[in-house]
Image (cartoon, rainbow, N blue to C red):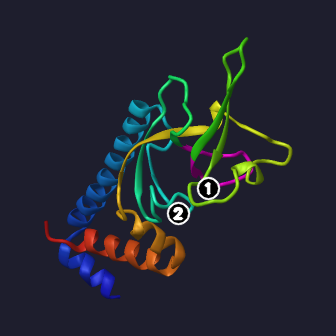
Amino acid sequence: MEFLSQAKKFGVRSLLLQGLTFLSVLTSAFMIWKGLSLFTNSESPVVVVLSGSMKPAYDRGDILFLHNGFSPIEVGEVVVYKLNDKPIPIVHRVMKVHTENESGEQYLLTKGDYNNADDRGLYSPGQMWIQRDEIIGRVKGFVPYAGMGTIWMNDYPHLKLVLLGTLCILSLFSND
């Protein structure tokens, strides 16, 4: 009942305006994301490091900026790749590169800096290398710990619901 009295107080037009403003913010964010994806040639131009496997180079919660250029990948570069059977991308360093002479196709072996073994245990059964088309991007920059909010929201799902609910209520009932 309080919602209806609040709606009458603000008026239907005002609530519709708030809703349209909220939708325009969402669509703007989506367009910026898609523009970055086109510019960087990467399906995900920004990722958050979720584990400590890349210490000391990158810590859990660091935001990484990616670019997926067409030049060959070299040993030592940090790449983000996604395997078909794994839902979460992996951030690791390229340890070995195998290039086929005839096709020029690159095959990569990766490893986390903090890990003792290479990533063959993470790859699909029988897979010894990752292919170039599994690479989401190469790391070009980072912001330390700026992605901790994302990690907290994944670790505590109720926090995500509280934050989203609060933002929706604030956007609907703000006077601006």
Q: Nearer the viewer, mark 2 or mark 1?
A: 2
| Pointer 1 residue | 88
Q: Position of residue 152 (x, y in %)?
A: 46, 74
Task: Find out whether the residues at labels 2 and 1 contact each other: C-beta distance under 8 Å.
Answer: yes
Image quarter for residue 129?
top right
Image quarter for residue 87?
bottom right
Residue drawn at x 63%, y 59% as measured from the top left = 115
> Relative to residue 153, is residue 27 drawn left or right?
left
Q: Residue furthest bottom?
A: 1
Q: Residue furthest right?
A: 126
> Relative to residue 36, is residue 73 drawn left or right?
right
- For residue 94, above or below residue 146: above
Q: Position of residue 169 (x, y in %)?
A: 31, 75
Q: Position of residue 92 (x, y in %)?
A: 57, 49
Residue drawn at x 50%, y 23% as measured from the top left = 71
Q: Which mark is residue 50?
A: 2
**Which kind of residue does numbered mark 2 sit on?**
Leu
Work out how far the residue at label 2 is from the one at label 1, CA to CA, in angstroms: 9 Å
Which residues lie in the magenta part?
Answer: 79-92
Label 2: element kind: loop
